[in-house]
Amino acid sequence: MGNKKRFHIEYGDHGILYALMIFWLFLIITNKNFRGLAFFQTILTKASLNAICGIGMTFVIISGELDLSVASQVALNGVVLTLLLPRFGVVPSIVTVLLLGAVMGTLNGVIIAKLRIPAFIATLAMQMAYRALAQLVNSSPVVVENKLFKRISTYKICGVIPTAFLICLLLGIVGTIILRKTKLGRNILAIGNSKPAAVISGIHIARTQIMIYLLVGLFTAASSIMYVSYLGSSNYGMQSGLEFSVISAVVLGGTALKGGKGSIFNTVVAAIFLITIRSAMDSFGVDSYWQRVVEGIILIIAFSITEIRNIGNTILVKYHAKKQLKVVS
Amino acid sequence: MSSRAKKFWFIWDRIGILGILLTVMMIFGILDPRILKPAQLLTALNRSAVSGIAAAGMMFAICAGGFDLSVGSILSLTSCIIAVQLTGGKSTWYAIVMALFVAALCGFVNGILITKLKIQTFVATLATQLAFAGVTLVYCNKAIQLTSKVNRQLKFFSTGRLFGVLPMPIVLLVIAYVITYLVYTFSPFGIKVRALGSNETAARTTGIKADMVLIAIFVVTGLTAAIAGILNTAQVSIGDPSLGSGFELDAITAVVLGGTSLAGGKGNVMGTLIGAILVVFVRMGLNILGAGEAYQKLAVAVILVFALTINGIKLIMQRGEQ
């Protein structure tokens, strides 16, 4: 029992994993397109790109806040990356972009922690600023020529496992270790649970917040490298609206918007789930504009899932109470 | 807070934003005197009608301690409805009433999500921003140019002159702000909004139907966004599903610049109006100086962070007093 309980604390609920399995089974039975390795490889690759960004976002949401600037960060990173690649080669450009991501994250963190601006509105402003900067850096689309770089996201190890998924798993493990095994992770969980309590227990809020946004910046930079490698091009308008799918993945993965609890493993699974829904809609011929509406509705459902559960519980309790009343009378 | 600091914030609340506006005008005037020509200033006022009217609705939302991030999508939706209805041969008034009705419905949906499903306002409206943008694209997936024949009546709202003298957008802006001022200061609705913003629990205990007030607020932001959308469509003669992207930031910036507290409970009607004019003026000034769209967006973002910082400092000093 003790062992099982510990497992739950470490990795959270597995509802989303079961949902994904059932959904996959349903798709495999109903549609021919979903039988075959290629389909799963595409889904895992696409989902990994979202999930890597989601790992960073999980930290923010656990601390009880939101980062709306990730999509624009990806755009700025991507634009800079494609400018650097032909001149400096793969490794230096990747390192530079990771640094750039760290700088953007730290800037967000400083604005939020030191200027005391609510996170979502600060990152809303930075979303506009980063997008504008990306446009200033380069306003025309650039195609990546470097073959080695393109293979980062598209290569399949032994022809089976996509590298993108492997990188995503590695980063997921790193994220989980940071969240569960380090002081920083415990501080983030504490802030999310109760900020006043965290202050009283001597946690340096501002420093932790800056670290959180630094982590987001790093994971987002990693994600943008993967995106550029996968798409083979960049432009300043790229991935606009990414923040929605990333936030949906995190929230669907059971991380509470109020903060205090969450699991990176579930974020990754939820990202795969969302991409599966999108591919399913594609193959069932759902119009791409309708897909946006569906995504919006999924987001709303994810946000209100706790309340829906509460309402369901109340109805159940009332029902049982009525039954018992009947028995008594 | 020392009495001196108190005095500073007292004065700042009343004329601080006006001072910033005048300073910015002076700086732009030095860089390029053309910007301060009366005709140019009139254009700025005309243009600020769009974000100004939306900001008036947003002020109620922020004053109640909430946010509405979906106004940009509602604006696009309105624009598309007007364009589709007009090109479909319907009358202008029919199109306008239809647009207002749909916008009110959008606001109602926001209100229901916030009050019944208990999602925080900014998160709920973030999700509906995506959903409404999707609905807009399903309804009309490309920009529709309005021909001058179809647009004749609608154009009256953007270039027409009331009694042959007063430009229509400015008339609408003034009417909107007079109504907002009266509603905010004197009506039971305004008082309830402020009560809700300063202390929700207390407001609920005193018997204010908080849910009803919140739904009403989001219907109001929806309606003001729709009016802004109608004006904007009339100005650019185009129904565009991406017309309102990023618009919510302009509206929020105007409100926060105007001195409305993010903590809720304290609005500033005249400040919001001046804030809206300031944002439009900066955008226009940069445009005349030859800075493109990207620089303008950057400028708005920087102004917003600046306004939020001042707001934060004020809050910290006021809290320190207690």
Image (cartoon, helix red, strand yellow):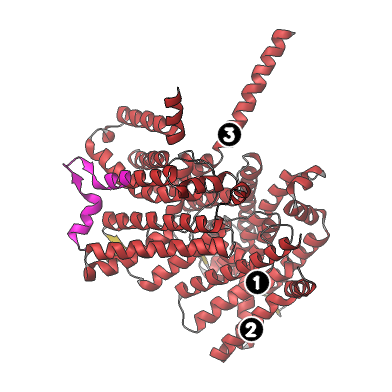
Crowdedness near tag 2: few (<14), some (14–19) or many (≥20) residues, C-alpha within 10 Å? few
Q: Residue at x 45, y 77 (%)?
A: B292
Q: Looking at the picture, how far across and down is residue B265, in whole percent?
A: 74, 57
Q: Looking at the picture, how far across and down is residue A120, in whole percent?
A: 55, 56
Q: Amino acid at mark 3?
A: Ile
Q: Quadrant of the C terminus of chain B?
A: bottom right
Residues behind callouts 2 and 3 on a single chain: no
Label 3 sits on residue = A308
Q: Secondary structure at mark 2?
A: helix
Label 2 sits on residue = B23
- Left or right? Give the position of A328 relative to B148: right
Can residue B168 be seen here?
Answer: no
Q: Amino acid at mark 1?
A: Gly
Whether residue A48 is situated above or below residue B162 in the rendered picture = above
Say which quarter of the image contains residue A75.
bottom left
Q: Which mark is residue B275?
A: 1
- Left or right? Give the position of B68 relative to A25: right
